[in-house]
């Protein structure tokens, strides 16, 4: 549930209260250490059964907890693939009368991983045939956050016979304090107060295409000069060497002082950054959903994304942003199209962004959609 690991924890934090509001309370079992500092901020009941070990995330306490506790639930949702928690939950629910088990793949069946990390794919291929295929095929349903994710998942592995369901995904709307949130940002990053900027917000990782963003920004700055918005690249980075290479490249190709690296932003500062940005930019090579994209739309900030962000069709169809290929020229074309828009077109896109969030990604809509999918498979004895 560590927020530094990505947007999934943020969605779960929002989803559990939304489900409770519909009369369906839930609990979270995770593999954090019980004393993890981010756990007290979670309002939902959390069972911290870690810390987990090695890349497989083995946690010896997990299976015994599952065996003892799962019978009191009406449904169980496993978030993610390829690690011990999926196998342990599968085994714990083999007993007759167990609650139905659902698996949220969260983009982990995307064929991009096979192309980009062929050695890891070999290990996944063996694990697929040893365990993961059966884990998915015996689930009540495998859940996808959009049609594009479901389509791509069919290309990765053979031998699948699982039921597919697409459910809405999303996050909570930001707290209603725009002025206070912007001020919180400007206090922490004062250099942004008087300058428009584009915002990247998320984990700084090679799959996110941040290198494309830096290179493209340098090209555009050479053309547009001071008229170009600044670039803010905010988020944690686990690979310090990679971060330094990006920063060195930005220093070499972008005008001095135009690219900011404020690190991970949270709370009011994060919302202030999203609200104050002229546009949110995510040029990923692979992105299942992108909680930060939905958060940007909630703030009325248009999203400029690659066509490898699986919800790009929804974004462009709603008029809430623009999309382009995840290449150097595609990124240059994407940002150039934004620069060429007049103020009226950008204002209309901001209004469309808010509307798109309300209709598609607000957590209440996501909770209703998930609940409908679960109730399709919950036996009547558990679902009166």
Image (cartoon, grey):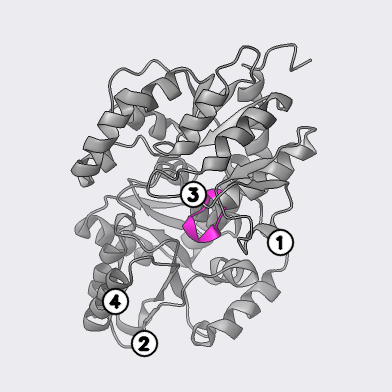
Identify the residue shown where x is 25% and y is 62%: 332
Q: Which mark is nearer the camera, 2 or 3?
A: 3
The reply to whether residue 133 is in sight is: yes
> Could you tell which of marks 4 and 1 lies nearer the N-terminus?
1
Depicted 107 relative to depicted 303: above or below = above
The residue indicated by pointer 3 is 52
Look at the image and give the residue range highlighted in magenta: 1-8
Identify the residue shown where x is 37% and y is 25%: 131
> Could you tell which of marks 3 and 4 lies nearer the N-terminus?
3
Measure the alpha-carbon separation of dots 3 and 1.
Answer: 33 Å
> Could you tell which of marks 2 and 1 lies nearer the N-terminus?
1
Q: Which mark is residue 257?
A: 2
Q: Quadrant of the C terminus?
A: top right
Q: Which mark is nearer the camera, 3 or 1?
A: 3
Q: Which mark is residue 175?
A: 1
CA neighbours of label 4 inside 10 A, class few (<14), some (14 to 19), many (20+)? few
Identify the residue shown where x is 68% and y is 12%: 379
Q: Is residue 180 magenta?
A: no
Measure the alpha-carbon separation of dots 4 and 1.
Answer: 34 Å
The residue indicated by pointer 4 is 244
> Could you tell which of marks 2 and 4 lies nearer the N-terminus?
4
Say which element carries label 3: loop
């Amino acid at each position: 549930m560590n927020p530094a690991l990505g947007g999934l924890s943020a969605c779960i934090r929002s989803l559990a209260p939304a489900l409770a509001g519909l009369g369906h309370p839930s609990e979270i079992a995770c593999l954090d250490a019980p004393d993890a500092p981010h756990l007290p901020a979670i309002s939902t009941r959390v069972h911290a059964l870690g810390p987990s070990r090695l890349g497989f995330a083995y946690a010896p306490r997990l299976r015994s907890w599952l065996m003892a506790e799962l019978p009191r639930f009406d449904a169980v949702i496993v978030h993610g693939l390829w690690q011990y928690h999926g196998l342990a939950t599968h085994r714990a629910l083999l007993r007759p009368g167990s609650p139905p088990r659902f698996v949220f793949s969260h983009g982990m069946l995307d064929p991009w991983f096979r192309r980009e990390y062929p050695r890891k794919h070999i290990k996944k291929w063996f694990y697929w045939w040893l365990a993961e295929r059966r884990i998915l095929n015996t689930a009540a349903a495998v859940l996808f956050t959009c049609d594009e994710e479901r389509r791509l998942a069919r290309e990765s592995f053979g031998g699948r016979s699982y039921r597919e369901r697409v459910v809405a995904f999303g996050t909570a709307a930001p707290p209603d304090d725009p002025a206070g949130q912007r001020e919180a940002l400007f206090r922490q990053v004062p250099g942004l107060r008087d300058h428009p900027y584009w915002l990247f917000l998320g984990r700084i990782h090679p799959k996110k295409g941040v290198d494309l963003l830096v290179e493209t920004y340098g090209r555009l700055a050479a053309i547009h000069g001071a008229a170009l918005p600044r670039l803010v690249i905010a988020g944690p980075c686990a690979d310090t060497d990679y971060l330094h290479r990006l920063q060195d490249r930005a220093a070499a190709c972008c005008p001095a002082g135009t690219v900011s690296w404020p690190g991970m932003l949270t709370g009011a500062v994060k919302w202030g950054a999203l609200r104050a940005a002229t546009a949110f930019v995510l040029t990923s090579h692979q992105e299942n959903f992108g909680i930060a994209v939905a958060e940007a739309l909630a703030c009325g900030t248009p999203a400029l994304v690659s066509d490898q962000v699986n919800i790009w069709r929804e974004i462009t169809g709603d008029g809430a942003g623009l999309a382009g290929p995840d290449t150097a020229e595609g990124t240059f074309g994407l940002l150039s199209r934004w620069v060429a828009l007049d103020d009226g077109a950008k204002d209309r896109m901001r209004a469309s962004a808010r509307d798109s969030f309300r209709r598609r990604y607000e957590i209440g809509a996501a909770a209703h959609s998930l609940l409908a999918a679960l109730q399709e498979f919950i036996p009547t004895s558990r679902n009166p």
